[in-house]
């Protein structure tokens, strides 16, 4: 079982939910597929989705909701199926 | 006169406000987030107060932190700039309650003009035209047909509970209205849980034209209009003053209506009244008022020679307006190009980065408002505006020639910017001929993208 790191190519602010009142996109322990949205990165008032790149189980988030991130920073880990 | 000014903003407008205060001999305090501790505003202000972390909701939107910074530094006044808390009535109220001066109109005026329906009523009472529409919900097609005679075709059938462009159908004549009205009601019911619909005139190819005003609570003057039709995603990209679409009689009527509305409010400070202008019929319609300084204010300063931010500070300090309307002359033409940290080749994706080399244009009729310096790291947490390049000429043609020269002289590396978009816009015959409306730029960009893909 391979461990995958989800990274952000962008600097900005990481969010786990689409809006302050909404539920999180994804929770630890949840199944994800390639393309599953697990969060958002806001850079200069524009939002980009953060997606899982492989199928597996979301093991952990490495940054908090609302935390500032740098390019290349690891945001989450996924236990891949393959 | 104000004794000490807290600048509750960042970026180029913070630098702009500090410059105006300095010209009047008012000491300044830059309120900065941690991410802006090394900003140009922080370097230029007499004092710096860190008001919180990078996130705007914990710094520039944190009213209590701003008030604390004002108290700690002994400032007697706060300039909110644009965006952030500049049109937040509760903040203006809190500033006054703390015994400080809010540089802008009072909270009551901000609240009144911030409410769209209330602003529309205020305009109608002042005799300022608004987009014709039904006074409220229309129950049935007979009522809609009667109302349509007053509103005029083509018209839009809009869901009362809709918004953001959803729940809208168009009718070009009575027959189409008969057909579309019941569909609109059913759709509104399905989409928004309410079948209530109303009518509004559809203004094809509208231009966005706005009037700059200054008031001291008793008297109001205008500083002519700005044309801001070149927009992308409702964000202004390129502005000019005056508008090339108005004849002198239209200009006079438009500016007089803005003064009338602002005088009916007893307006105090700098403000902008936005209108839609129908160049086919020559009609203009008030849409909303911005009760603050605007990004594109320099084009008005260039054609009138009036420093709007200094005027705001003087008015806030209790001085009456020094200008009479007849003192304000429309001189030549001015253009503003917004340089953003966005990549036009990648659908304007934001590109924060470090300024590697920097050279601004110089010479007659050229002005640059910017917070950049060589080595500055543009933070990713705020908007992407890097600089405004503003030019003035005796006429529109000279302004365009100066704009081309200014862009040639501009050197900015380290990140992708919208400089290339402006080079293209200046060379575009339809821009030169002022043939555009609020939808034009997006159409051109889509055409260009399609042409590049072929």
Image: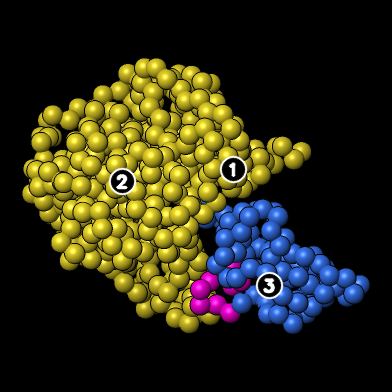
The answer to whether any part of residue B331 appears in the image is yes
Local crowd size for mark 3, using a 10 Å CA cut-off: few (<14), some (14–19), many (≥20): some
Tell me which corner region of the image, top left, top right, bottom left or bottom right, holds residue B240.
top left
Whether marks 1 and 2 lie on the same chain: yes
Q: Residue at x 36, y 17 (%)?
A: B364
Q: Position of residue A53 (x, y in %)?
A: 79, 65
Tell me which corner region of the image, top left, top right, bottom left or bottom right, holds residue A77.
bottom right
Q: Which residues are magenta?
A: A15-23
For the residues marked 3 and 2, what is the alpha-carbon distance in whole angstroms?
A: 40 Å
* Residue of label 1: B353
Q: Nearer the viewer, residue A12 or B400?
A: A12
User: Vertically, is B98 above or below B273?
Assistant: below
* In-image side of B288 versus B368 (left or right): left
Q: Nearer the viewer, residue A62 or A9?
A: A62
For the residues marked 1 and 3, what is the alpha-carbon distance in whole angstroms?
A: 26 Å
Does the magenta stretch mainly form a helix, a strand or a loop? loop
Q: Secondary structure at mark 1?
A: loop
Q: Secondary structure at mark 2?
A: strand
Chain A color in figure: blue
Whether tag 1 and tag 3 are in contact, CB under 8 A, the answer is no
* Residue of label 2: B47
Q: Which mark is residue A61?
A: 3
Judge depth for marks 3 and 2 and give the one in front: 2
* In-image side of B21 versus A65 (left or right): left
For the residues marked 1 and 2, what is the alpha-carbon distance in whole angstroms?
A: 26 Å
């Amino acid at each position: 079982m391979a461990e995958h790191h989800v990274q952000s190519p962008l600097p900005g602010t990481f969010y786990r939910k689409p809006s302050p009142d909404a539920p999180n996109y994804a929770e630890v322990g949840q199944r994800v597929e390639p393309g599953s949205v697990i969060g958002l990165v806001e850079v200069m008032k524009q939002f980009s989705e953060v997606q899982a790149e492989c199928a597996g189980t979301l093991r952990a988030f490495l940054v908090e909701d609302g935390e500032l991130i740098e390019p290349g920073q690891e945001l989450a880990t996924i236990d891949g199926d393959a | 006169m104000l004794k000490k000014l807290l600048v509750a903003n960042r970026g180029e407008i913070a630098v702009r406000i500090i410059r105006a205060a300095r010209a009047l001999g008012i000491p300044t305090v830059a309120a900065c987030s941690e991410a802006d501790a090394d900003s140009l505003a922080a370097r230029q202000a007499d004092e710096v107060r860190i008001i919180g972390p990078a996130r705007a909701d914990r710094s520039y939107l944190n009213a209590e932190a701003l008030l604390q910074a004002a108290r700690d530094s002994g400032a007697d006044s706060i300039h909110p700039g644009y965006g952030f808390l500049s049109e937040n009535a509760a903040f203006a109220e809190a500033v006054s309650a703390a015994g400080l001066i809010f540089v802008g109109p009072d909270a009551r005026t901000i609240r009144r003009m911030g409410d769209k329906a209330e602003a529309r009523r205020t305009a109608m009472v002042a005799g300022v035209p608004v987009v014709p529409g039904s006074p409220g919900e229309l129950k049935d097609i007979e009522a809609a047909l009667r109302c349509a005679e007053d509103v005029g075709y083509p018209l839009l059938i809009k869901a009362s509970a809709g918004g953001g462009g959803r729940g809208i159908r168009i009718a070009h004549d009575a027959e189409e209205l008969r057909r579309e009205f019941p569909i609109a009601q059913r759709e509104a019911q399905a989409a928004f849980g309410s079948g209530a619909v109303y009518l509004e005139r559809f203004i094809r190819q509208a231009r966005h034209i706005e009037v700059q005003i200054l008031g001291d609570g008793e008297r109001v003057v205008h500083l002519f209009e700005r044309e801001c039709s070149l927009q992308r995603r409702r964000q202004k990209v390129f502005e000019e003053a005056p508008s090339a679409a108005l004849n002198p009689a239209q200009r006079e009527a438009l500016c007089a209506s803005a003064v009338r509305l602002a005088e009916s409010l007893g307006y105090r400070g700098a403000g902008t009244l936005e209108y839609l202008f129908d160049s086919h019929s020559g009609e203009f319609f008030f849409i909303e008022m911005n009760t603050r300084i605007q990004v594109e204010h320099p084009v008005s300063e260039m054609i009138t020679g009036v420093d709007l931010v200094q005027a705001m500070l003087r008015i806030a300090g209790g001085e009456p307006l020094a200008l009479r309307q007849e003192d304000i002359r429309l001189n030549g033409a001015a253009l503003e190009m917004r340089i953003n940290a966005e990549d036009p080749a990648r659908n304007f994706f934001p590109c924060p980065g470090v300024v590697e080399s920097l050279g601004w244009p110089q010479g007659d009729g050229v002005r640059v408002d910017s917070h950049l310096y060589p080595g500055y790291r543009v933070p990713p947490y705020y908007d992407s505006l890097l600089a405004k390049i503003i030019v003035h000429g005796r006429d529109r043609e000279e302004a365009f020639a100066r704009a081309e020269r200014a862009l040639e002289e501009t050197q900015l590396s380290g990140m992708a910017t919208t400089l290339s978009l402006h080079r293209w816009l200046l060379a575009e015959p339809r821009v030169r001929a002022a043939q555009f409306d609020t939808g034009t730029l997006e159409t051109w960009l889509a055409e260009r993208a399609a042409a590049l893909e072929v």
